[in-house]
């Protein structure tokens, strides 16, 4: 039986002090009080007034609590016997708040109570036996609870506006605008940008007579520009320039928005021409890029291509894709700040963009016009993007094939995007003016960091260039020493004529690959025509009515290839092959064995000395078809053989080696493309399994090409000893595993300047007959 006359700790006490709480505006029955002791009171405990040792105290008390985010209060009459210490902290709280309040509590009734016990709230709900417990938080502190009743205004928006203004004022201060008599409003466009100290700046780091420099030294005063677009820096269609204007009018890196938008509005109906090079998305899909709900799909920029700094007035929003009209305006806007006569311009789609550039310039404002006739302007495609272009573009727009550009790669904007892309998630929801000011500040910070670290970075590059120059010079001199003086002089004349005007289509481009591919089909055709000419002259060297010497050797080389394929299948089958697999292997062996026996009967007519070798082999255990010796002229060594047959095999093996190399290069290109596609686009287990199967098939074909070339190489070496050929290798070499590398490896750690091409990529397909002569 529960004792209602005692409190949870067994004591019987009455109220000795009480404080009146000031009522709050909302009305809802709630009450709370705090217990000092750690003993939990029994829930729903009711102490009748008659059982109290002292007269019960009746009072009117205001209760306050928080429910569903609102503070609610109520005034009720309650009756209870309560320990004095129960309200000691509340009294201290009232004193701390400077309130002269009086509690006049005598007890509690059956209303809903919140009892604080050791960091937890216990809720007593109007006589029910249920209770809920939740973890105490900072808001449960009585002082914080009391003070949270007062509404506080959110200052975040005001603070961010102060940050924006502070950034703007710091930009003006760093640019020295406070000391200019014209004041802040006298700031001109691009004047607050951090300039590149290593780029040529007339009046700052150039000699006074730089414009009179001889033609051979004009490249020293060239400006390198790199153009690119970033579609991560989107902006949603929120606010407007009238509601959220920029604090500057094109004073730093962004162009003046009014002039820019006015120009774009006038050129709305322009249709962009399609690409005549590879299918570049930047050109062909400029009109189709998704722009729903976006005021800007990205930004276009013009950077310093050598030192990776943002150019003044070289940044602008892209409304719908990477259109020429946007990039034209940015390009000519930043050129207003330069008076140099030598320009090197890099752009991913420069091969298409530079067409009709000067005619499109006429539609720009007069302040953006450029006297291009008095300047030397060369266009390039960045090195990483160049392989995606057609072969012609890979020579005309290549940094590697152009003089006076050093080790420039044109990929400077791509490095800057890695720094600015994390800002995209914050700026995409900003208004137009706030976004431009924020990006201006970040671009200025990027430029300043590049300026601070410019000395150390240039020192590292100079040290590396010294070592690399010595290695490349030694490789060049070694290669140049094997070229005849006549060929070297003729090539030098062609190269100098093309370098004078590389855009002149009437001048032959000496860098374009020229050559006639040497294949087995062409070699067989040539030998067949020679036999036809001999028949016309009455010379018939055939000993079989249906099989000529050329057909005999060519058939033997084909049988050798079938043996290699069968051996690969047998090796892959393993020791736990099924009966069906064993049956297929047996049938293939029997078929190949019959082909070899039929071919060998004809071979004995042309090479009788093979009969002894075949007899010795047949005396042993029956061989599998894939390991049977064919005894072609290259394998006879000191045995008697018709020199005519040796010459035929030499021609066919020579063609087989070139054919295998060409197929090997194709396999390497395909394998590299599939790897890149798989890494960027393939997701999911099923798709990855299919892609891996395709890679395995290409790799198997690549391995077959390597074996075919090595077989041809060994045969050529044997025939060279038999036929006493000297300097027969020409461009052919022994193929090692380290030589089997792609032309452009997307997973390689070395850059273009440090990469060494293997000899398989230096074959142009042209080997004169003199390469095989005895001299």
Image: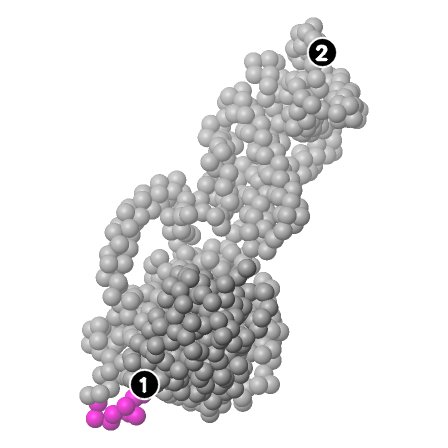
Q: Residue at x 58, y 62 (%)?
A: 278
Q: Is residue 717 left or right of residue 54?
A: right
Q: Is residue 188 magenta?
A: yes
The number of callouts visible is 2
**Is the residue marked by circle 1 packed among few (<14), some (14-19), or many (20+) residues within 10 Å?**
few
Q: Which mark is residue 622?
A: 2
Instruction: Please name whichever residue, 173 or 582, is drawn nearer the observer in this view of the structure.
Output: 173
Residue range (magenta): 180-193
> Considering only vertical position in the picture, is 251 above or below 567?
below
Q: Residue at x 53, y 40 (%)?
A: 767
Q: Residue at x 29, y 66 (%)?
A: 450
**Does residue 299 appear in the picture of this structure?**
no
- Residue 602, given in percent of the width and then of the height, sits at 75, 19
Main SS type for the magenta part? loop
> Considering only vertical position in the picture, is 756 above or below 571?
below
Q: Which mark is residue 616?
A: none
Q: Which mark is residue 99?
A: 1
Q: Residue at x 49, y 84 (%)?
A: 77
Instruction: Please name whichever residue, 587 or 549, is drawn nearer the observer in this view of the structure.
Output: 587
**Is the residue marked by circle 2 packed among few (<14), some (14-19), or many (20+) residues within 10 Å?**
few
- Residue 14, given in percent of the width and then of the height, sits at 39, 74
Q: Is residue 167 left or right of residue 289?
A: left
The residue positioned farthest toward the top in the image shown: 619
**Does residue 28 appear in the picture of this structure?**
yes
Sequence-wise first label, 2 or 1: 1
Quarter of the view holding residue 107: bottom left
Give the position of the N terminus as an image quadrant.
Answer: bottom right
């Amino acid at each position: 039986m529960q004792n209602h006359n005692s409190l949870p700790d067994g004591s019987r006490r009455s109220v000795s002090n009480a404080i009146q709480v000031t009522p709050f505006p909302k009305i809802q029955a709630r009450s709370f009080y705090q217990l000092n002791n750690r003993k939990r009171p029994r829930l729903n405990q009711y102490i009748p007034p008659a059982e109290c040792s002292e007269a019960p105290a009746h009072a009117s008390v205001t209760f306050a609590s928080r429910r569903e985010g609102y503070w609610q209060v109520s005034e009720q009459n309650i009756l209870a016997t309560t320990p004095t210490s129960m309200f000691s902290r509340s009294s201290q709280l009232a004193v701390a708040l400077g309130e002269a309040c009086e509690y006049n509590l005598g007890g509690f009734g059956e209303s809903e109570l919140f009892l604080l016990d050791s960091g937890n709230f216990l809720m007593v709900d109007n006589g029910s036996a249920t209770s809920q417990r939740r973890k105490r938080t900072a808001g449960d502190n009585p002082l914080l609870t009391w003070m949270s009743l007062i509404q506080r205004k959110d200052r975040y928006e005001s603070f961010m506006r102060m940050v924006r203004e502070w950034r703007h004022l710091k930009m003006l201060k760093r640019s020295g605008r406070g000391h200019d008599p014209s004041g802040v409003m006298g700031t001109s466009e691009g004047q607050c940008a951090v300039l590149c100290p290593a780029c040529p700046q007339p009046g700052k780091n150039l000699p006074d007579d730089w414009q009179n420099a001889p033609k051979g030294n004009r490249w020293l005063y060239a400006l390198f520009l790199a153009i690119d677009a970033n579609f991560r820096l989107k902006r949603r269609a929120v606010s407007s320039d009238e509601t959220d204007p920029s604090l500057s009018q094109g004073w730093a890196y962004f162009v003046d928005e009014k002039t820019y938008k006015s120009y774009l509005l006038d050129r709305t109906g322009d249709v962009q021409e399609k690409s005549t090079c590879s299918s570049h998305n930047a050109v062909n899909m400029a009109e189709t890029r998704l722009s729903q709900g976006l005021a800007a799909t990205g930004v276009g920029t013009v950077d310093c291509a050598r030192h990776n700094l943002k150019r003044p007035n070289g940044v602008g929003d892209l409304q719908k894709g990477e259109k020429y009209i946007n990039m034209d305006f940015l390009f000519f806007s930043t050129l207003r700040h330069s008076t140099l006569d030598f320009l090197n311009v890099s752009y991913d789609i420069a091969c298409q963009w530079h067409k009709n550039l000067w005619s499109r310039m006429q539609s720009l404002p007069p302040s953006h016009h450029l006297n291009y006739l008095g300047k030397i302007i060369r266009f390039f495609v960045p090195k990483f993007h160049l392989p995606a272009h057609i072969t012609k573009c890979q020579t005309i727009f290549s940094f590697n094939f152009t003089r006076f550009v050093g080790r420039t790669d044109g990929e400077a904007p791509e490095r800057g995007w890695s720094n600015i892309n994390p800002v995209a998630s914050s700026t995409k929801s900003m208004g137009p003016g706030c976004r431009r000011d924020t990006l201006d500040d970040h671009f200025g910070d990027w430029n300043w960091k590049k300026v601070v670290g410019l000395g150390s970075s240039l020192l590292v590059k100079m040290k590396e260039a010294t070592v690399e120059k010595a290695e490349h010079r030694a490789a060049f001199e070694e290669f140049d020493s094997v070229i005849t003086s006549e060929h070297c002089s003729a090539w030098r004349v062609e190269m100098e004529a093309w370098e004078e005007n590389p855009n002149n289509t009437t001048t032959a481009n000496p860098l374009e690959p020229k050559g006639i591919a040497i294949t087995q089909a062409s070699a067989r055709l040539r030998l067949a025509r020679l036999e036809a000419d001999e028949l016309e002259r009455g010379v018939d060297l055939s000993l079989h009515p249906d099989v000529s010497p050329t057909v005999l050797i060519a058939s033997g080389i084909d049988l050798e290839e079938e043996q290699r394929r069968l051996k690969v299948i047998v090796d892959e089958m393993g020791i736990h092959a099924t009966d069906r697999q064993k049956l297929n292997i047996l049938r293939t062996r029997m078929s190949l064995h019959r082909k070899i026996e039929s071919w060998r009967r004809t071979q004995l007519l042309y090479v009788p000395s093979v009969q002894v070798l075949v007899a010795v082999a047949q005396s042993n255990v029956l061989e599998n078809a894939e390991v049977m010796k064919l005894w072609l002229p290259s394998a006879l060594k000191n045995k008697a053989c018709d020199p005519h047959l040796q010459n035929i095999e030499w021609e066919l093996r020579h063609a087989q080696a070139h054919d295998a190399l060409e197929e090997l290069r194709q396999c390497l290109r395909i394998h590299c493309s599939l790897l890149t596609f798989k890494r960027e686009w393939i997701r999911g287990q099923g798709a990855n399994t299919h892609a891996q199967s395709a890679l395995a098939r290409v790799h198997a074909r690549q391995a077959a090409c390597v074996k075919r070339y090595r077989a041809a190489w060994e045969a050529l070496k044997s025939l060279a000893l038999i036929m006493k050929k000297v300097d027969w290798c020409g461009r052919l070499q022994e193929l090692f595993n380290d030589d089997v590398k792609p032309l452009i490896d997307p997973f390689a750690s070395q850059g273009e300047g440090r990469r060494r091409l293997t000899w398989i990529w230096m074959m142009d397909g042209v080997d004169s007959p003199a390469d095989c002569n005895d001299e």
